Amino acid sequence: MKLDRLVSGLVLGLILVAGPAFAQSNAQPLNTDGIAKAMGKEGDLTGEMYRVSFPRSDLTVKVGNVVIKPALALMSWAAFVKSGSTAISYGDLVLLDDEINPVISKLEERGIELSALHNHLLPENPRIMYIHFVGRGNEVAMAKGIWEALALTKSPLVSTPASPEAKPELAKEIERIIGYEGTISVPGKRHTATFGSPIAANPRVRESWNFVVTSLSPTFAGRDATRSRL
């Protein structure tokens, strides 16, 4: 009888110890193909994060006499990371005034929460607002919901190849000073969590700087982790 109890205790202990590791080893990877299909275009996989971007190339936005290019400050995007058996999504949506309420309603309808609504540019024309959102659930279902929200705007949703642009000489000097080439987006070193789950490759905790060269001087637009909303 004592032997039976001892064996039962050992088996129970092994189950308790090995159970989480076994579950983790059998966790499904992020369904990037499903996300791409739901959003109508492929994204970029960086580590554990999959990000799909939608530049607002339909807009002509000016700050003073400077025309703001989509890559500078008019980029809608959604990022996805796996968290256990579910996924977490973050992102920004670039919106005109009359697009805000329909987009918020659609996101909430699909179970995606609004975490911030504010502007990044001053004083721009036309007025542009930015929605920050966060959601947790099935990555494909969230991707469909985000796409449905974008479909309520005038955002171009069809993937088109970008035309190559010559890098100005000033860009080389900026790269030399900062120490990074091309698109400058430096991952942060903070450990963050949302919905109680740690995020190994947080799409928000990173420092990024954007520059556009005008005929007068370079124009700068930057965002850092201290201003990001988690």
Image: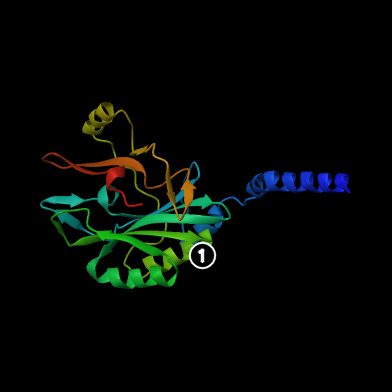
- The three-letter code of the residue at mark 1 reads Ala
Name the residue at 25% across, 27% down: 177
- Which residue occupies the foreground of this view, 55 or 137? 137
Q: Position of residue 77 (x, y in %)?
A: 37, 54
Q: Position of residue 95 (x, y in %)?
A: 28, 63
* Residue 96 image-quadrant placement: bottom left
Disc 1 element: helix
Q: Position of residue 230 (x, y in %)?
A: 36, 52
- Which residue occupies the foreground of this view, 117 or 208? 117
For the image, the number of numbered tags is 1
Name the residue at 25% across, 71% down: 98
- Which residue occupies the foreground of this view, 214 or 226? 226
Task: Report which residue position mark 1 lands on.
Answer: 141
Name the residue at 55% across, 58% down: 34
Question: Going by the image, does 93 lie left or right of 119?
Answer: right
Question: Going by the image, does 38 lie left or right of 129?
Answer: right
